[in-house]
Image (cartoon, helix red, strand yellow):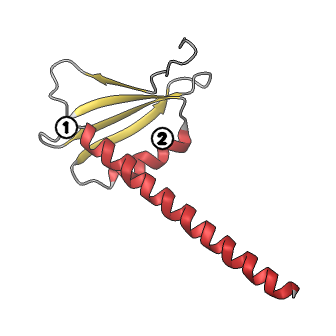
Amino acid sequence: MAEEGERKAVLETVQADGTDGNCVTFVLHDEDHTLGNALRYMVMKNPDVEFCGYCITHPSESKINFRIQTRGTLPAVEPFRKGLNDLMGVCQHVLNTFERSMKEYRAQREEEMQ
């Protein structure tokens, strides 16, 4: 358990012996299907990814095992990083669209009240 003021590791990597980094399992702590499924979708859009999947280790644990296997010599960490960045971009777009719509809605309501 982390001491007060220390940060607990939220990501570990597991690589099978004899592999060159193109097949890696990332263990994400304090995560569930919410991130797992969205990230899997984003990573699978990459044509260099041969396999991408995740599993919840146990219902009482809040961590997921997220595995990526790439074609060729591309290290698995690259599509993982790109998937996270792409997912953050999509989330930011959704947030911006929502906030803009709320602003327009409030302005419209104020006009109707006058």
Q: Position of residue 113 (x, y in %)?
A: 87, 84
The residue depicted at 47 percent of the width and 49 percent of the height is 38
Q: Which residue is mark 2?
A: 36
Residue 42 image position (x, y, % from top left)? 38, 52
The quadrant the C terminus occupies is: bottom right
Q: Nearer the viewer, residue 99 or 20?
A: 99
Residue 93 relative to residue 67: left or right = right
Question: Residue drawn 23% across and 54% down?
Answer: 47
Q: Amino acid at mark 2?
A: Gly
Residue at point 43%, 53% (across, down): 87
Marks 1 and 2 sit apart, C-alpha to C-alpha, by 20 Å
Q: Quadrant of residue 70?
A: top left
| Residue plotted at (49% across, 59% down) | 92
76 or 8, which is in the foreground? 8
Q: Secondary structure at mark 2?
A: helix
Q: What residue is shown with label 1?
A: 75
Q: Decide which of tag 1 and tag 2 comes sooner along the chain.
A: 2
Q: Count residues near mark 2 (Cα–Cα under 10 Å), then give few for <14, some for 14-19, many for 20+.
A: some
